[in-house]
Image: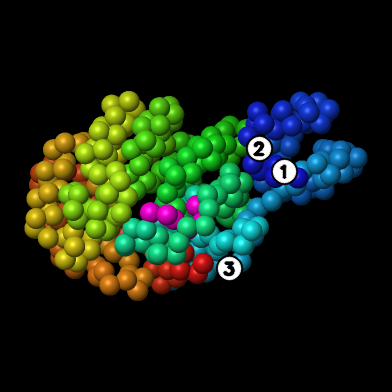
């Protein structure tokens, strides 16, 4: 039996037609599922009892199951979901000072990239998430928190290694017939998969792109991000420039500051040189410890980096972390799984 939450609009119409039902039933179902967030056939009140029974015999509606919810001192909440075949994934709800609510979605159970500063990579890789498991994270939260305004694909996993499911989920989340999220309110973060960046440029979406940089020379980046050994900077930079030229949109680079690793004077000079080859913003992020030997850079070092970059005309800001006390901050996901 198939999960209806894996069907986009066209697929649902095709499935309904195959079942010998009129097409308008597909529109009704899609509205119940993706607009009203009703996941029980018996609550779909404009469908007859007979039709509900027929649908229950053909499909099921499955969301990831909430195993645990943790709340941080700053109001951040972490949702631990259990998938049908056992793996756990984690999703974070972040509320800022303006009361804007952002959900951080996972795209894989675990992650195969093994970045040294990230707990998810150290937990191993289980599998890609299905479309229903990606959108289901949001839907499970939205029933209790209806005013979510922003989405970031920055949770567990590398989105561009689950490319087709992530793109399908994106289109479903931004469809007018569904949640109708504004594309510019969504950000996808990648560790730097050139083929994925180029494909994404060709999607004709207004979704924002962020790239986990963390070092601007191959030796340092390869040490903390093994993906750089396969896709070094001389492959990443052309892909990003292709994206910028094709879309006309700026990208944001993310730079987690690690004491003695990428916060030295030579790293700063390398960063300045890097931004002569590419036009982008940079978010400087304090390292969130998770038992690794890495240590966060001192606050004064972070301030010095930002000031020096801004003096060169580079748009650099510090991105504050939330939820650290429940291991929900950047790089800390997967410790419970």
Q: Earlier in the sequence, mark 2 or mark 3?
A: 2
Identify the residue at horizontal 47%, vertical 57% (top origin).
125
Identify the residue at horizontal 72%, vertical 48% (top origin).
61
x then y, percent, for residue 321? 34, 61
Secondary element at image label 3: strand
**Outermost residue, front side:** 230
Q: In screen coordinates, is 239 left or right of 120?
A: left
Q: Is residue 171 above or below residue 265?
A: above
Residue 68 numbered tag = 3
Question: Magenta includes 296?
Answer: no
Q: In screen coordinates, is 331 left or right of 273?
A: right
x then y, percent, for residue 279? 21, 36
Say whether marks 1 and 2 touch (CB < 8 Å). yes
Q: Which residues are magenta?
A: 108-113
Q: In screen coordinates, is 173 left or right of 97?
A: right
Q: Earlier in the sequence, mark 1 or mark 2?
A: 1
Give the color scheme: rainbow, by chain, secondary structure or one colour.
rainbow
Q: Which one is nearer the viewer's eye here, 311 or 221?
A: 221
Disc 2 to disc 3, C-alpha distance? 27 Å
Residue 7 numbered tag = 2
Q: Earlier in the sequence, mark 3 or mark 1?
A: 1
Q: In screen coordinates, is 280 left or right of 325?
A: left
Kindly report which numbered mark, 1 or 2, lies closer to the viewer in this rendering: 1
Disc 3 to disc 1, C-alpha distance? 26 Å
Q: Which one is nearer the viewer's eye here, 319 or 266?
A: 266
Identify the residue at horizontal 87%, vertical 44% (top origin).
53
Kindly report which numbered mark, 3 or 1, lies closer to the viewer in this rendering: 1
Is residue 181 at least partly visible in the picture?
no
Identify the residue at horizontal 16%, vertical 43% (top origin).
274
x then y, percent, for residue 130? 58, 46
Residue 2 numbered tag = 1
Secondary element at image label 2: loop
């Amino acid at each position: 039996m198939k999960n209806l939450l894996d069907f986009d609009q066209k697929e649902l119409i095709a499935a309904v037609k195959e079942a010998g039902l009129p097409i308008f039933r597909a529109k009704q179902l899609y509205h119940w599922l993706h607009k009203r967030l009703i996941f029980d056939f018996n609550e779909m009140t404009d469908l007859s009892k007979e039709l509900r029974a027929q649908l229950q015999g053909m499909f099921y509606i499955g969301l990831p199951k909430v195993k645990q919810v943790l709340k941080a001192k700053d109001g951040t909440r972490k949702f631990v979901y259990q998938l049908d075949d056992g793996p756990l994934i984690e999703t974070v709800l972040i509320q800022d000072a303006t009361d804007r609510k952002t959900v951080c979605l996972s795209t894989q159970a675990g992650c195969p990239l093994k970045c040294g500063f990230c707990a998810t990579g150290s937990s191993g890789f289980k599998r890609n998430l299905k479309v229903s498991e990606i959108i289901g994270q949001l839907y499970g939260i939205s029933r209790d928190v209806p005013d979510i305004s922003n989405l970031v694909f920055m949770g567990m996993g590398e989105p561009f290694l689950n490319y087709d499911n992530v793109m399908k989920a994106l289109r479903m989340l931004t469809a007018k017939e569904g949640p109708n999220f504004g594309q510019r309110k969504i950000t996808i973060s990648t560790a730097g998969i050139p083929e994925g960046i180029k494909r994404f440029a060709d999607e004709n979406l207004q979704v924002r792109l962020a790239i986990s940089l963390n070092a601007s020379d191959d030796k340092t980046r390869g040490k903390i991000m093994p993906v750089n050994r396969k896709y070094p900077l001389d492959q990443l930079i052309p892909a990003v420039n292709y994206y910028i030229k094709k879309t006309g949109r700026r990208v944001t680079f993310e730079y987690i500051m690690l004491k003695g690793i990428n916060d030295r004077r030579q790293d700063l000079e390398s960063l300045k040189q890097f931004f002569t080859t590419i036009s982008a913003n940079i978010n400087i992020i304090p390292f969130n410890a998770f038992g690794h030997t890495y240590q966060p850079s001192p606050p004064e070092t972070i301030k010095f980096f930002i000031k020096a970059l801004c003096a060169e005309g580079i748009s650099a800001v510090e991105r504050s972390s939330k939820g650290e006390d429940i291991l929900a901050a950047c790089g800390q996901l997967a410790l419970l799984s």
